Amino acid sequence: MLFKNNISTYLFYDYETFGKHTSLDKPAQFACIRTDMQFNIVDDPQYFYCIPPDDYLPDPNSVLITHITPQYTHKNGTNEYNFSKKVHDILIYPNTCIVGYNNIQFDDEITRNIFYRNFFDSYEWSWKNGNSRWDLLNILRACYVFRPNSIKWPKNKLGFTSFKLSDITKENNILHKNAHDAVSDVYATIEIAKIIQKKEPKLFNFFFNIRKKNELQKLINIKKFTPMIYISSYFTAMRHNASIVLPIMYLKKNNNVLIAIDLLKDFEILINLFKRISLNDNLSIKDFSNFGIVLLHLNRCPILAPMTVINKDDYNRLNFNLSLCKKNINLIKKNYFLIIHIENIFFKEPDINQSSNVDLKIYDSFFNLHDKKIIKSIRNTLPILLKNTNYSFYDMRLKTLLFRYRARNFFYTLDKNEKKIWLKYCMEIFNPIFFKKYNNQILILLKKNNNDFKKVILLKKLLNYAFQKNKNILINSINLN
């Protein structure tokens, strides 16, 4: 450790994963670099690998992108519990601002899910002991909207600005040798942060200072009907990932969520909808998003800014129709008696995941204090001793989580009956239909990439891995009978 214990630091981090789904897919590699607030590296870079569990097979497309095979992680990595513990010990260091590139939507979700599956707190790492989180991708989007001359902007095949890390680094001559290698991506992210801080220090510092919910709330004035500029991929590249919104209210059941109206949509359509429907009608999220109702999660570092940060030329460049905004604000004021029912109409039921798969149920509810004590106890108990414990869980997700935790990470600690249950579960996942579909997917990719020797090798290794996994499950099942 090259830095003093009490200083504030950035921790730039990145995962490479075996798939895109943040709950169901598994991490392959973690990398991080700690810097001081001027982006000087203050500790040795760290990176390590994670072995996928026995009830999981990687997405072949992800392996082609990262070039990390499950065989490589078996040789150089550790099980998901030990992997998660390493990540946890790094992230919980006090006064750390945890930063990535698209980490709010992806990497942070991977972190939450591996902690959920392995009996670490899914949230404390990002706020406790002076910690916070931030996302450089959103800051780049802010630069594009507010200060477009700060860096060079690459275009994608459709002619829109590309915010892909590899495209940004290439366009701006930033060293980025191995895109989709976690270590290389972390170094590239640090270089982008340096450029933004150097070229646009006011913008950089403004959004850094409001990254926490409490500071962000000071900018929001619901009572005075104060519009704001909101930058999000929600608005799509066609709209420059930006719009003018009017904050309306906080969700009663979750004050981290702010309801706002997109002022660049025709608000009369929403007013007419309110007049047609009753409080008993059921509407899905797709329904209200199409009508210009926007949800801002204040604990996800949204990019909100006052209208004063841009001028008339910027409004024209961004196609912001101010007359439409003023018209919509007046309509909202006149129809506020309808607006106040937004929550009652659109958010009547709690968002409980109906899936039976406990891996998908991280956001069903928070664990209570009773269960949190048990979670800590499980984490601190030797795996071999867990089979002799009889925990009384309040939240029944934990019973299944505990069994999967033991089976995935410490299969040797299961008794004969538990092994039978686990192997039966694995066979249900890896049924003949699954394997046929998985093999066909690889064969299609082999045909598509038959001139790329490296990709052919990767795909053949994956095909062999899937075959061996299926074989091992069958043999183990036979041996137990």
Image (spheres, rainbow, N blue to C red):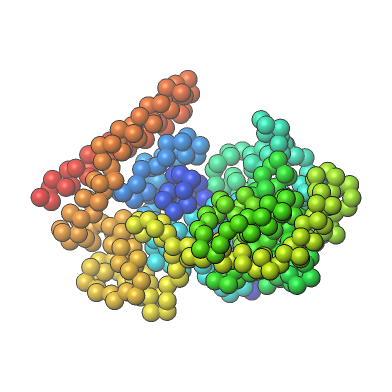
Q: In the rendered view of the protein, which quadrant contains the N terminus? A: bottom right
View extreme (right): residue: 312
Question: In the image, 345: left or right of 357?
Answer: right
Could you tell me which residue is drawn at 46 percent across and 29 percent down?
455
Total numbered circles: 0
Residue at 54% over, 43% down: 181
Q: Nearer the viewer, residue 333 or 416?
A: 333
Residue positioned most to the left: 481
Along the horizontal axis of the image, is 284 left or right of 304?
left
**Does residue 86 appear in this view?**
no
Location of residue 85 by image quarter:
bottom left
Lateral position of residue 450 relative to residue 265, left or right: left
Q: Position of residue 41 (x, y in %)?
A: 65, 57
Query: Residue 377 at what x, y percent from top left?
Result: 35, 75
Q: Is residue 228 above or below residue 264?
A: below
Image location of residue 236, percent across then percent down:
66, 44
